[in-house]
Image (spheres, rainbow, N blue to C red):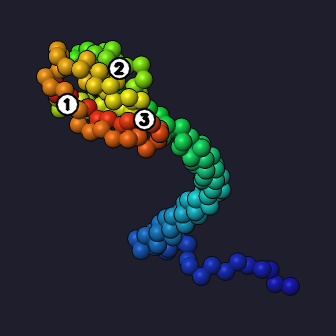
Amino acid sequence: MPKNKAINLLPQEEFDASSMGRVLKWTTGTFRMIVIATEMVVMGAFLSRFWLDAQNSNLNNSIKVKSAQISSQADLEKQFRSIQSKLKIFDKISQNQNTSTFVDKIAGAVPANTTLSRISMADGKIEIRGTSISDYDILQFVGALQGSPFKTVELQQVGSSKNDSGGTDFVVNITY
């Protein structure tokens, strides 16, 4: 029975001795290392995908929860912004020192049977809308407003009240 011998088709001594053989041996070893490094990178990317998917799922859930919280607070935000805009208007009016003087003078002149529904102030003019039971009370109101601190007081409009039978609606324009 013959002995099994390993047959190497590339001669060892001559292959290592020639420069072409050394270059070939170096390139095959280098390519082997490149293939191994590439496989490691691919395996790392494949395994990191599970971690990234879990993180993405957590972020999506967090976004859903936070958007639900924001939408539930939408009405409160609208009310808050509305109140802030009213406060800005009030602050602008209250900075004008004459405003309180004018409002005090108007409030002091209102007769007992007269109700004011609106006071508008803009550009040196005041418009007062109200309702009174008698015409005499309206004239008394206009007479009380004449003089300091107002320049002119005019009874602009008088008519029967749409809401109150027997009442009279009026509009008074004042310049200051």
Q: Earlier in the sequence, mark 3 or mark 2?
A: 2
C-alpha gap between disc 2 and disc 1 = 15 Å
Find residue 54 and report its horizontal and vertical position in percent: 65, 52
Position of 112 with respect to 152 (left or right) is right
Given the image, on which type of amino acid does mark 2 rest?
Val
Whichever of labels 2 and 1 marks the residue nearer the N terminus, that label is 2
- Residue annotated with mark 3: 167
Of tags 1 and 3, the one toward the viewer is 3
In the picture of the structure, the residue carrying the numbered disc 1 is 154
Q: Is residue 22 above or below residue 109?
A: below
Q: Amino acid at mark 3?
A: Gly
Q: Tell me how far mark 1 sits from mark 3, CA to CA.
A: 20 Å
- The residue that label 2 is drawn on is 110
- Amino acid carrying label 1: it is Glu
Location of the N terminus by quadrant is bottom right
Q: Quadrant of residue 166?
A: top left
Q: Secondary structure at mark 1?
A: strand
**Quadrant location, the C terminus:** top left
Which residue is nearer to you in this view: 128 or 80? 128
